[in-house]
């Protein structure tokens, strides 16, 4: 065993898979609150929103930073959902903890960088918070495991791996190739590590979310991380891959949960 883990102890629904949903980015307080209210009405228990956005090119919207953290606090207070955001530096971690963010995730560009991972691991020493680690952008299982080992060695025991696909020059179908053999091999190596699929960043377009969710469940994934926005076409980042809370609810209602492998309890 390469990681020392404890159960995630996060809310999950008995009839539906464990889902974390919310917009790619926290754009405005109104957009965050509107999306969160609609998701909560559909029974969603965990909310995601990016506050620090790692954009491929400069000049785009790079997130509202600390200004958006009180919006997530408001989501918690008004809907009861747990809130999750992406962190990429020790300063992000310090701020997220200061505002009481419930779940942290490490993005695919950051998990590819051992220096950044070690700096974040050092900032997490003595902290008890669930940390999800997305796969590195490149298809390197050892780098992914190494990133998780650094966080785990800092004392973080509630962890999950997020499969968000791997960068490729070939964008015919997927934005990021799923290469399912990699998360499958990760599960074989570390069976007790919860596995979450992010169909939004694999597909890159909303029509692929439903089939990718079903494929993930059929492969025994424990949960789903899905981008949902109150007005997807107007989203400031990743507009093509976001769905309204209504459509998300419809997609989730169609999923057939066949496996009994949930390890998130
Ligand atoms: C995101 O979740 O919005 C994000 C930036 O994801 P990734 O790190 O998988 O590209
Ligand atoms: Mn996104």
Image (cartoon, rainbow, N blue to C red):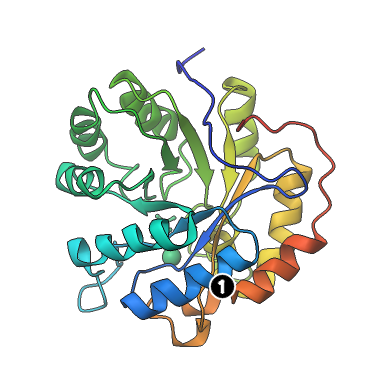
Residue 91 x %, y %: 14, 46
Residue 51 x %, y %: 29, 62
Q: Residue at x 20, y 45 (%)?
A: 98
Instruction: State the image quarter where residue 189 is shown.
Output: top right
Q: Residue at x 61, y 67 (%)?
A: 41
Q: Nearer the viewer, residue 155 or 31?
A: 31
Q: Residue at x 59, y 37 (%)?
A: 195
Q: Note whether 65 is above or below 127 in the view shown.
A: below
Is disc 1 surrounded by few (<14), some (14 to 19) or many (20+) residues within 10 Å?
A: some
> For mark 1, what is the residue?
38
Residue 89 x %, y %: 19, 46
Q: Residue furthest left?
A: 91
Q: Note whether 192 is above or below 222 in the view shown.
A: above
Q: Residue furthest bottom?
A: 234
Q: Position of 192 compared to 64: left or right?
A: right
Q: Does residue 187 appear in the picture of this structure?
A: yes
Q: Report the image quarter containing ligand 2.
A: bottom left
Q: Note whether 5 is above or below 22 in the view shown.
A: above
Q: Residue furthest top?
A: 1
Q: Note whether 51 is above or below 17 in the view shown.
A: below
Instruction: State the image quarter where residue 184 is shown.
Output: top right
Q: Does residue 238 appear in the picture of this structure?
A: no
Q: How many marks?
A: 1
Tell whether circle 1 marks a residue whose Cβ is less than 8 angstroms from ligand 2.
no
Q: Secondary structure at mark 1?
A: helix
Q: Residue at x 31, y 25 (%)?
A: 150
Q: Quadrant of the C terminus?
A: top right
Residue 142 x %, y %: 44, 29
């Amino acid at each position: 065993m390469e990681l020392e883990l404890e159960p995630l102890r996060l809310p999950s629904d008995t009839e539906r898979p464990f889902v974390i949903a919310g917009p790619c980015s926290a754009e405005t307080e109104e957009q965050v609150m509107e999306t969160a209210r609609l998701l909560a009405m559909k029974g969603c228990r965990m909310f995601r929103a990016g506050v620090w956005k790692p954009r491929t090119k400069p000049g785009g919207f790079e997130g509202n930073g600390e200004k958006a953290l009180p919006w997530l606090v408001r989501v918690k207070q008004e809907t009861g959902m747990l809130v999750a955001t992406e962190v990429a530096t020790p300063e992000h971690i310090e701020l997220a903890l200061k505002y009481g963010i419930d779940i942290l995730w490490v993005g695919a560009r950051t998990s590819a960088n051992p220096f950044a991972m070690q700096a974040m691991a050092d900032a997490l020493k003595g902290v008890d918070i669930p940390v999800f680690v997305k796969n590195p952008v490149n298809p390197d299982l050892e780098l992914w495991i190494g990133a998780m080992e650094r966080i785990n060695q800092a004392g973080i025991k509630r962890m999950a791996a997020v499969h968000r696909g791997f960068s490729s020059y070939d964008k015919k179908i997927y934005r990021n190739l799923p290469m399912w053999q990699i998360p499958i091999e990760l599960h074989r190596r570390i069976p007790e590590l919860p596995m979450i699929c992010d169909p939004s960043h694999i597909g890159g377009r909303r029509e692929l979310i439903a089939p990718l969710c079903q494929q993930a469940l059929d492969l025994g994934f424990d949960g789903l991380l899905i981008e949902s926005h109150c007005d997807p076409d107007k989203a400031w980042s990743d507009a093509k891959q976001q769905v309204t809370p209504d459509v998300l609810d419809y997609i989730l209602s169609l999923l057939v949960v066949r496996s009994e492998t949930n390890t998130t309890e």
